[in-house]
Image (cartoon, rainbow, N blue to C red):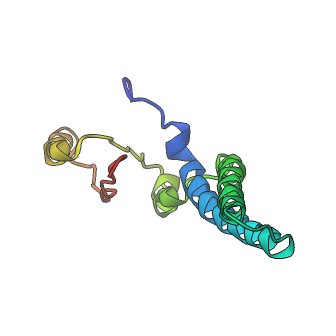
Amino acid sequence: MEGLHEANVLQTTDLVHGAQIGLLIGALLGCIVGGAVVWYFPVAGIWQTVTVLGASIVGALFGVWVSSMVGSSIPNSRLARFQPVIDDGNILMMVDVPEHRTEEIKSLLGERHPEASSRGLEPHIPAFP
């Protein structure tokens, strides 16, 4: 275990998943609130669109903030499938490597630790598609 880093907050908690859900729900609720404001307080012109878009953005930001705080206190839901194996005394090792080096790292790990087993890969999602 020497030389290995501990998992960080993004890997051990549901912070990212919470932020994604908060973004969607917050934007939807913000849009609904903006639509209600425009419906009950009609103002002519472009202000209707600005009100709905502004409320959607504010709702999305508020949703991300609140859901991220909640998600940071919840264990990562993607790791739940490994919990029985961890409870049996095994070690979960997550390896973050570039996609083109995946097979090389798998074979190197298999040579040094034949008792280790691969349990899957997360899909490659680029930061800026």
- The x and y percentages for residue 28 are 66, 68
- The x and y percentages for residue 14 are 58, 52
Q: Residue at x 54, y 45 (%)?
A: 12
The residue closer to the viewer here, 51 or 105, is 51
Q: Is residue 89 left or right of residue 100?
A: right
Q: Residue at x 67, y 58 (%)?
A: 50
Q: Residue at x 80, y 76 (%)?
A: 39
The residue most toward the right is 40
Q: Quadrant of residue 56?
A: bottom right
Q: Is residue 11 left or right of residue 99?
A: right
- The x and y percentages for residue 6 are 48, 33
Is there any visible trace of residue 103 in the rendered image? Answer: yes
The residue closer to the viewer here, 10 or 118, is 10
Q: How many labels, in total?
A: 0
Picture layout, residue 77 above or below residue 93: below
The residue closer to the viewer here, 12 or 33, is 33
The residue most toward the top is 3
Q: Quadrant of residue 33?
A: bottom right
Q: Quadrant of residue 109?
A: top left
Picture layout, residue 101 above or below residue 57: above
Specify the quadrant that holds the N terminus.
top left
